[in-house]
Image: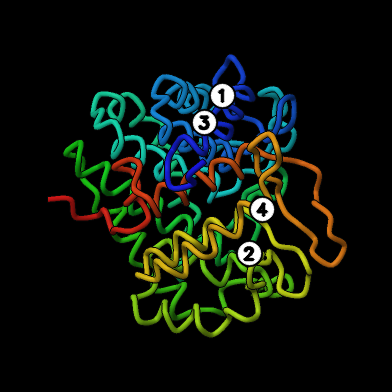
Amino acid sequence: MNSKTLDFYIPSINYILEVQNSDGSIPWEKGEKLDPWDHVEACMGLSIAGKKDEAEQAFLWLSDNQLEDGSWYSEYLKSIPQTKRRETNFSAYIATGLMHHYLIFKDKDFLEKLYPTLSKAIDFVISSQTLQGDIYWAKEEGKEILDDSLITGSSSIYKSLECAIAINEILDRPADRLLEAKSKLKNSIINNPERYDRSWESKSRYSMDWYYPILCGVYTHDKGISIIDSKWSEFIVEGKGCKCVSEEPWVTVAESSELVMALVKLGLVDKAEDLFNSLHQWRDEDGLYWTGYVYTDKKFWPIEKPTWTAGAVLLAADTLYGFTPGHELFLQDWTSLN
């Protein structure tokens, strides 16, 4: 079957539908845990598949489970919180998901319906921004703010702020406060690296810190090309994919799929397609993708095929092959739609 057609990914689509619970929540696997970021990632896979009702049920689950401060807990099991931690990038990602949904379905009424949820979520995120522009990565009951910031998480928030601004523009809502927060965050990521990984070992060994600021539009095109070139040999195993951690012999499908989108954004389409095609060898006989592969041991690890990996693959395929109008989600800056 041709991997350039949406039909090739029907097993991934059906799997997300099978795992989705009746309340709209999408756990990693059937009966397993859920986190809000990966829930949205899988939800976007449903939107690509044209499963509008099911995708909207996933967004409504977020509305139904939102906390008073606009956040969500970082982990749920059968919709029951398993932690009191609330992560800022998890809470922001609904904006990216809703913008994606709008690009595909052009349903302004649904944006209006979810706007109160979105607005509260973004308020929570902006309330966690420091005077230096970075955004605290989490808050936790008993400790409140957890005093550090993450490059990958902040880059994801940057894209979510962009999408929230675009939604405000679509709905004729003011966005000045969001524009200011986005500008301060960008300046922090680019010019104040000391604000990140202040209280733990640097996460620069993780590939997401390498490509995520590019994927989310923090850097200019030329700077993005330079960054990709600088660490390509550190993270890429030719013919296998992108490593999650530089020193580990482990390629992962979701990280590789996100890198594919970053490469397309930079115009490196041939390189992106070569990388994406290498991932199909990690697709099982049932058509689902394993999380990752330890190539020194010739073993899949962990033994799981999560919905968020399926979602990431669908996003990468759409970005490459243009199945839906949502394929441009990560390719454009949506803050000026007019």
Q: Where is residue 140 in the image (x, y as percent from the top left)?
A: 67, 46
Tell whether label 1 touches label 4 (CB within 8 Å). Answer: no
Amino acid type, mark 2: Gly
Could you tell me if the residues under marks 3 and 1 are in contact, i.e. CB atoms within 8 Å? no
Q: Name the residue under label 2.
A: 241
Check disc 4 and report the residue beneath it: 281
Instruction: Say which element carries label 3.
Output: loop
Frontmost residue, 58 versus 269: 269
- Which dot, 2 or 3, sits closer to the camera? 2
In 3D space, how far apart are the residues under numbered discs 1 and 2 (Cα atoms)? 27 Å
SS under mark 4: helix
Q: How crowded is mark 1: few (under 14 residues within 10 Å), some or many (20 or more)?
A: many
> How many other residues sit within 10 Å of disc 3, few (<14), some (14-19) or many (≥20)?
few
Q: Residue 99 at what x, y percent from top left?
A: 33, 41
Q: Which of marks 1 and 2 is nearer the N terminus?
A: 1
For marks 2 and 4 on the same chain, the one whose residue lies earlier in the sequence: 2
Q: How far apart are marks 3 and 1 (CA)?
A: 29 Å
Q: Mark 3 points at which residue?
A: 68
Q: Which of marks 3 and 4 is in front?
A: 4
Instruction: Identify the residue at horizontal 38%, vertical 28% (top origin).
Output: 50
The residue beneath circle 1 is 17
Q: Along the line of sight, which residue is nearer the eye, 193 or 94?
A: 94
Dots 2, 4 in contact, CB < 8 A: no
Kind of residue at disc 1: Leu
Tell whether label 4 touches label 3 (CB within 8 Å).
no
